[in-house]
Amino acid sequence: MPRPDVTWTGVTNPCSPCCAWDVSDRFQGLSEQERAACLIAERVLGVVAEPWDVDGRQGVVDAMLTYPTGRRAAFEVTALSGDGALQTLSLLSRDQFQWPLPGQWTWTVEVGSAADLPQLRGRYVRIALLCEAAGLSRPEQLWQRQISVDPDPDIAWLLEHSTSDMVGHPDLPAIDGNRVRSATVLPASRGGAVDESLSGLRQALEDAFAEPHMVRHLDKTARADTDERHLFLPVHWSVLPFPVFYGLLDDGQALPPEPPPLPPAITHLWLAPELARRVLLWTPHGWQNHYPYDN
């Protein structure tokens, strides 16, 4: 069975092939993300998941897992994502990651932050037209020409005050016969070497777990009066350094060399990186790879 279209980020991932997973009435009251996490736990552990943060319960974990032996596990699900990343994806998805082209060229717009979007929408057209008129594919090239005088305010805003970028493609005309192209608008990309050993994962998790919303989820999970306490984290690319996140995407056998930085009361940690085949599970016996999407 191909990997399901698990929507960890709140925006459907166009790279994931779809398949039908049983999300039956027994999961009513849980979000799509929580339902998918419960199904993964059932497949990996052979447990039965039961919605728990429903029916007016306050301050409790999202679900309970019951093993065939009767052993019970608290199960809390929360997305691990960078500040504003999910908001940026959600806003861009409303336009299907496309904007109309104002001139003769095709453009790619990389959005570094949701905070940039209101001004970027208003300034993008003029920036593109100025660059095309000058025959330059990068706004910074025009800014460098103007640096000895007062630079254009739209160009200056993009280069000096935003975290976004634009690239023109003069070899791809906006209108090509009957075809009308659009600008591609995406979250800003990242790069770097891949941490294949995952030696940087523990520090990356320490930084992520220090965020206030993560502290709340850690505390809630640790307080549960159950045999086990599980924290399940769908992992968005924005929260971890590039080398670590792309190390997690490796579907080979590499496992982190150190345990995660968890409170002692939390017994299990699940990491489900978006776009990856594998889910990593840490237990008191160490790290494990699982491939729940493959069967």
Image: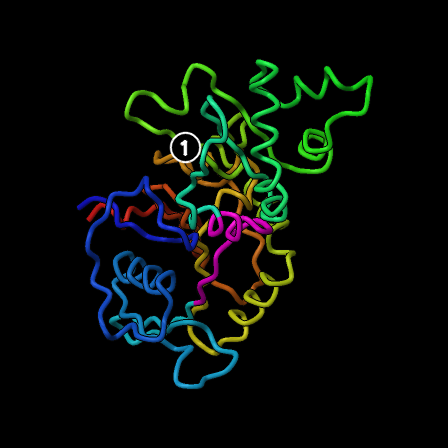
Q: Which residue lies furthest to the bottom in this view?
A: 56
In this rendered view, identify the residue nearer to me: 171 or 225: 171
Residues drawn in magenta: 76-91
For residue 56, side relative to residue 278 (left or right): right
Mark 1, Cα crowd under 10 Å, few <14 / some 14-19 / many 20+, is: some
Q: Is residue 213 left or right of residue 230?
A: right
Count of residue discs: 1
Name the spot of residue 120 as percent of width and height, x first.
60, 40
Relative to 79, is 221 above or below? below
Closer to us: 285 or 196: 196
* Magenta-span inclusion, residue 114: no
Residue at image point 50% right, 36% down: 198
Q: Measuring 40% from the left and 51% from the top, which residue is drawn there?
A: 11
Percent of width and height locating residue 159: 69, 30
- Answer above or below: position of 21 versus 14: below
Q: Quadrant of residue 73?
A: bottom left
> Residue 253 at what x, y percent from top left?
36, 36
Whether residue 284 is visible here, answered yes or no, is no
- The percent position of residue 153, horizontal first and vertical second, equals 73, 32
Q: In which quarter of the image is residue 55?
A: bottom left
User: In the displayed structure, would residue 19 be above or below residue 195?
Assistant: below
Looking at the picture, which amino acid does disc 1 mark? Answer: Ser
Residue 274 location, quadrant: top left
Q: Which of 107 and 283 is in front in this view?
A: 107
Residue placed under numbered mark 1 in the picture:
182
Question: In terms of secondary structure, where does tag 1 sit?
Answer: loop
Kindly tell me whether residue 242 is visible in this rendering: yes
Q: How is the image coloured?
A: rainbow
